[in-house]
Image (spheres, rainbow, N blue to C red):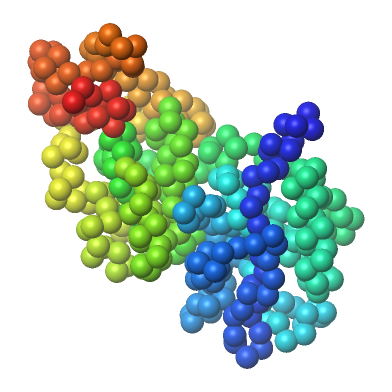
Amino acid sequence: MAAAEAAETQLMLAVGLIEKDTNGDTLWVWCYPSITAELRDVLLRKCCLTDENQQLHTFVYGQYRRSWFYVTTVEVPDSSSLQNVTHFSIVLTAKDFNPEKYAAFTRILCRMYLKHGSPVKMMESYIAVLTKGICQSEENGSFLSKDFDARKAYLAGSIKDVVSQFGMEIVILYTALMLKKRIVVYHPRIEAVQEFTRTLPALVWHRQDWSILHSYVHLNTDELEALKLCTGSYIAGFVDSEVSNRPDLYDVFVNLADSEITVSQPAKEAMTMGKLHKEIGQLIVQSAEDPEKSDSQVIKDISLKTREILTNLASFAEVSDDGEKPKLSFEALKQKRFPPATENFLCHLAAAEQMLKI
């Protein structure tokens, strides 16, 4: 049990503290064990304290170069022992996607800092969670790592909300994810971007891969370079409308504010819709509109349909002599005489699933 808990808790990488003082300056004050200068710059952008428009985002999260970051920001009440500080952000970096877990833990750390005015207690709690998976404090609440299952984090978004917003167009997002395309989502409110983007990987539940999620990206050179290094696909969230003028960043662009989905010119061929897509779209919409069904049941329905498509695809593949996984040749697919759009989709899907014989 202890070993499992240790494995579970070794997911945290670092904790940091950013303060905004009465002069309006925002500075890194402390971190443990360490955060690179490059990542500190990124986190200063994310923490909303450097933002001119003064809008307070209590909790944001995202990913940068394979590290997840979670940032909780609070305003300092007058009664606090923190002199000359108007706001501060607690930052956690970690290897796993689990917003609810780290929101709960950073809130406790914020209360500790407000009470004690020194990072020492925060560091003790961080080490306790790192080594034992638990931190308890009478007045600030207790935290238990194992209360936060990763699967719960995967299922926390509402697929039904996404479908009700986009209806049959949901199949464009499903297709883009199945074919490992790059999706960019724009909305001026970061909370809306995060809520929406975190739900999308559930459309391809068979992969259970949330590492494709970059839910809070700025149009900044470092961040865009890091995003472009992601092999294959990603889902990237932006609050800057300027991103719509960056077709180099996406295959599919979702303007969440206007409920519009656009497929970029170069991706149109792979994303051609046909009878199979219509069938999938109807299945998703019907399932999501069923008031009896929970979000996780809708995900299950979509996942079953995906399995059926993948099983079907695998049945056309030929086993090779060298014991590698079966590969599908384009000729074998042609012989099945599918409608052109279906054949096109299956061919691109085989490539995305690394089943295509080159």
Viewer-closest of 162 and 338: 338
Q: Residue at x 11, y 17 (%)?
A: 331
Image position of 20 with respect to 136: above or below: below
At horizontal 50% and vertical 67% (from top left) the residue drawn is 38
Asked which quadrant contains residue 48, the reply is bottom right
Residue 336 rendering spot, x and y as whole percentages: 13, 13
Residue at point 10%, 26% (across, down): 340
170 left or right of 153 in image: left
Does residue 38 appear to the left or right of 352 in the view shown?
A: right
Residue lying farthest bottom? Answer: 23
Question: Residue reaching furthest front?
Answer: 322
Determine if residue 106 is in view: yes
Q: Residue at x 17, y 37 (%)?
A: 270
Residue 164 appearing in the image? no
Q: Can you say whether 35 is above or below 231 in the image? A: below
Residue 141 screen position, x and y as percent: 82, 54
Q: Residue 95, position in %: x, y?
A: 58, 46
